[in-house]
Image (cartoon, helix red, strand yellow):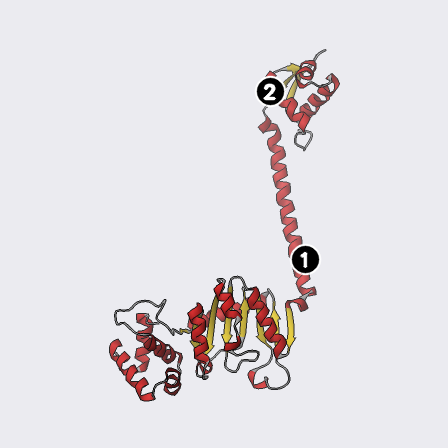
């Protein structure tokens, strides 16, 4: 093959006609193709150069078609190799561009917000634009908004956004906070608890994170500041941090709805009590949240320990996990 190109429209038509004729002179092809004879001669010469016809020389040469897979197969293979080489080049250039852009535009990956009001506005906007999932680390003494003020959560939950929140124990002990958490759970929030959390954190659609820049003990000095973090390795690290804590956290069940059924027939208050117990909330705070006395809390825990066949709270917590009461 002398030419690496494929067939143009005239060449393809002439080749098809020649296949139908088996053999033909240029005049015969010109007649069936309705071409001037000189154009038919030129087309046949191009097909010969591409290895698609053979010619029997003479005063009036005779042209015969050759198999196209032999002639064009090499061209196709070369094109495939060329495309693969081009793909690798584009991939390499794209990687170089991204690396350069990351270094050049690193300041665009992290935006700093100063002030409680701007921070509250950004959290509101992110929740209202969320499409799939919002993750929270909820610590005591919020910087920008109290739990009851986060009305955007209900709108996001109602349109199918998944909420996963981990609450610090101290927040569970704050008067009124459990009512707000219960409201969120009733709308579909998935809540868990841990004794402590390392940072305050919100992550929206696994694409944007908001994280304060100062430690809690320094929060009273000046306006609160937070970083809004876009896609990159820092965000990946924050996502991994959340998931590791989510696995270690204990569920907070304030209602029996959606929980695994159990033959012992635990009621809502008992599930609530067990959630707080496993989260490490003291009896005094449990009693306050349930509106009962500490003695009643102890009596109910005694009943649950008897039901689980254990005589310690540690054993009860183990049985709660094993029996999937939460």
Question: Height in image: 246 above or below 35?
Answer: below
Which mark is on residue 225? none
Q: Which residue is mark 1?
A: 97
Give 149 or 102, whichever is nearer the viewer. Answer: 149
The local secondary structure at tag 1 comes to helix
Does 250 sit left or right of 87 as displayed?
left
Q: Earlier in the sequence, mark 1 or mark 2?
A: 2
Residue 202, horizontal then vertical, whole percent: 54, 71
Does 44 sit left or right of 303 as displayed?
right
| The C terminus - image quarter | bottom left
Residue 112, horizontal then vertical, whole percent: 65, 74
Give 140 or 74, whichever is nearer the viewer. Answer: 140
Residue 190, horizontal then vertical, whole percent: 44, 69
Q: Residues within 10 Å of mark 1 (few under 14, many from 20)?
A: few
Tell me the residue at 54%/69% (across/down): 203
**Which quadrant would residue 205 be assigned to in this image?**
bottom right
| The N terminus - image quarter | top right
Give 49 or 280, whichever is nearer the viewer. Answer: 280
Tell me the residue at 35%/79% (across/down): 273
Q: Residues within 10 Å of mark 2 (few under 14, many from 20)?
A: some
């Amino acid at each position: 093959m002398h030419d690496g190109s494929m067939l143009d429209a005239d060449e393809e038509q002439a080749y098809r006609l020649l296949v139908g004729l088996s053999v033909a002179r240029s005049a015969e092809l010109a007649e069936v193709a309705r071409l001037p004879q000189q154009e038919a001669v030129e087309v046949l010469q191009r097909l010969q150069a591409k290895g698609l016809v053979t010619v029997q020389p003479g005063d009036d040469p005779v042209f015969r078609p050759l198999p196209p897979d032999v002639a064009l197969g090499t061209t196709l293979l070369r094109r495939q190799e060329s495309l693969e080489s081009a793909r690798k080049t584009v991939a390499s250039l794209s990687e170089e561009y991204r690396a350069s852009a990351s270094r050049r535009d690193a300041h665009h990956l992290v935006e700093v917000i100063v002030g409680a009001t701007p921070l509250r506005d950004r959290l509101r906007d992110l929740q209202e634009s969320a499409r799939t999932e919002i993750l929270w680390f909820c610590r005591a003494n919020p910087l920008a908004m109290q739990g009851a003020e986060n009305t955007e959560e209900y709108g996001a939950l109602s349109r199918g956004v998944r909420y996963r929140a981990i609450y610090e124990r101290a927040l569970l002990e704050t008067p009124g906070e459990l009512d707000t958490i219960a409201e969120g759970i009733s709308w579909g929030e998935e809540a868990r608890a841990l004794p402590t959390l390392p940072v305050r954190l919100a992550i929206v659609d696994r694409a944007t994170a908001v994280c304060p820049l100062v430690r809690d003990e320094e929060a009273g000095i000046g306006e609160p500041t937070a970083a809004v973090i876009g896609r990159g390795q820092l965000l990946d690290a924050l996502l991994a941090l959340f998931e590791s804590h989510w696995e270690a956290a204990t569920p907070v069940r304030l209602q029996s709805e959606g929980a695994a059924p159990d033959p012992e027939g635990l009621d809502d208050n008992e599930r609530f009590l067990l959630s707080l117990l496993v989260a490490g909330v003291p009896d005094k705070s449990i009693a306050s949240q349930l509106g009962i006395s500490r003695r009643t809390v102890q009596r109910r825990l005694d009943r649950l320990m008897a039901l689980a066949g254990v005589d310690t709270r540690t054993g009860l917590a183990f049985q709660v996990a094993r029996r999937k009461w939460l």
